Amino acid sequence: MKRKTIRYLLPLSLFILVCVPALSQVSPDVYQITAFDHNLNRNNADQWVRIINPGLNGENICADIYVFDDNQELLECCSCPISANGLLTLSLRNDLTANPITSQSPDKGVIKIVSSSTCNAKSPAPTPNLRAWISHYELIVGLTSAGSSAYSDASFDRSSLSSYEQSFLGQACAFAQYLGSGKGVCKCPAAP
Amino acid sequence: MRRVLVLSLFVLLFLSTIPLTWSQNGYCPAGTTLCLNDVFQLVFFDNAFNRFRTDQTIRIVNPGVQGNPITANEGKVCADIYVFNANQQMEECCACPLTANDLLQLGLRSNLLQNPMIGRPDEGVILIISDTGSNCDPTSPIPTPNLRASIEHLEVIPAPKVSPLFSPGTPSLTDTAFEESELSTHELQTLGSTCAKVIGTNACTCS
């Protein structure tokens, strides 16, 4: 009985030991996403992305930022350093979508942020744990002839980051910046 | 021999559970001896000194995990509040007590930025540590779960281009919850020691 138990338990333990860490290799608390819309609104109302470094390891952390249009095309990417307890404020219009590789600023799309230690969006090195928000500009249609508008703040949604996605983001960024010859790079505003 | 095998199996099983436990509890950076959850939250603020003179309200609630209104300490938890400008400099700090199920409302301008250390920051960061009611000391917090907080954000909608007259735009208020983060020992100590230098002359207020 004991021998049988051992015979089954040994492979099971080895399987758990080897496979569980492999399955859990998605990096925790390093990746977050949000949508944007009405970027090209008629009121010229800008929208802001705000990122904070909570100071978990007391060092600079970089926000590797990837901006996609709603056709899943990477338009811009960049890496912005943020020191502990620092706030980085980015303009959607001027910093994140003004220099797309397609030369066509998107009205809507997706922003992805990888919290990284190396400040190189072409090869992100995930490390926890930036926090980010976006101010959404919303149009309320139908209440008046011109429509009215309002802002609505939302935090980015955190997601696990697979090694596949991590690799894809880096490669897509390198590709966009290589082909773009200056385009495809978003802008980190100077510290206040 | 069998004993060794059985023992090895137990060791293997134990080791195999470590990655799971680790990922469930989140990530603790190397070198930290403590990694605390549900005690630390943060948010940004902006347009604090807006032209509309609109104050933005921070709301903190004590969910009552540490006791209830009829227990001895009434479930008291303190919100240790740290206000930074956008340059990572602490402007003010203070501790505000909340008993169980209590709601504390603070004005960004009237309570948290009325006495800044360096200047009047228009934008910055607010950090809150949930501190034990018996301690209530932002210079040496003893983290305990689990306050919840939200903030009003004021954004300015620009006037339409076609408007013939100058218009400052329209204010728009939106509520946002604070975001939780793990708290490292390094950050805990840094916040406490920095606050100790600030609180004597630049304390925020709770009412």
Image (cartoon, rainbow, N blue to C red):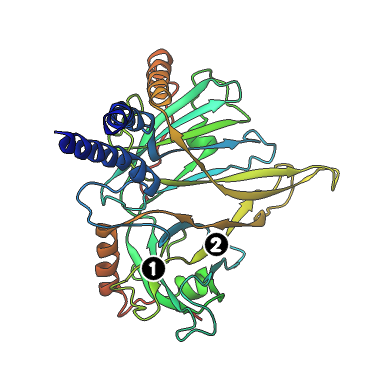
Q: Residue furthest front?
A: A1
Q: Is residue B148 visible?
A: yes
Seen at 47% across and 42% down, the residue is: A90
Foreground mark, 2 or 1?
Answer: 1
Disc 2 with disc 1 on a shared chain: yes
Decide which of A19, B111 is in the foreground and name it.
A19
Seen at 59% across and 50% down, the residue is: A153
A180 up-or-down from B127: above or below: above
Task: Tell me residue B42's x, y (percent).
Answer: 44, 58
The picture quadrant where one finds residue B4 is: top left
The crowding category of the residue bearing disc 1, from other C-alpha atoms within 10 Å (few below 14, some 14 to 19, many at least 20), is many
Three-letter amino acid code at disc 2? Ser
Q: Chain of mark 2?
A: B
Please indicate whether residue B9 sits to the left or right of residue B114 in the image. Answer: left
In the picture of the structure, the residue carrying the numbered disc 2 is B150
B99 up-or-down from B192: above or below: below
The N terminus of chain B - image quarter = top left
Decide which of B56, B148 is in the foreground and name it.
B148
A54 up-or-down from A23: above or below: below
In the picture of the structure, the residue carrying the numbered disc 1 is B144
The picture quadrant where one finds residue B180 is: bottom left
Please indicate whether residue B81 sits to the left or right of residue B19 in the image. Answer: right
Decide which of B99, A137 is in the foreground and name it.
B99
Q: CA distance from mark 2 to mark 1?
A: 19 Å
Q: Is residue B124 visible?
A: no
Decide which of B203, A2 is in the foreground and name it.
A2
Q: Chain of mark 1?
A: B
Three-letter amino acid code at disc 1? Thr
Task: Tell me residue A189's x, y (percent).
Answer: 40, 41
Q: Residue furthest top?
A: A179
Task: Report how many numbered discs are placed on residues in the image.
Answer: 2
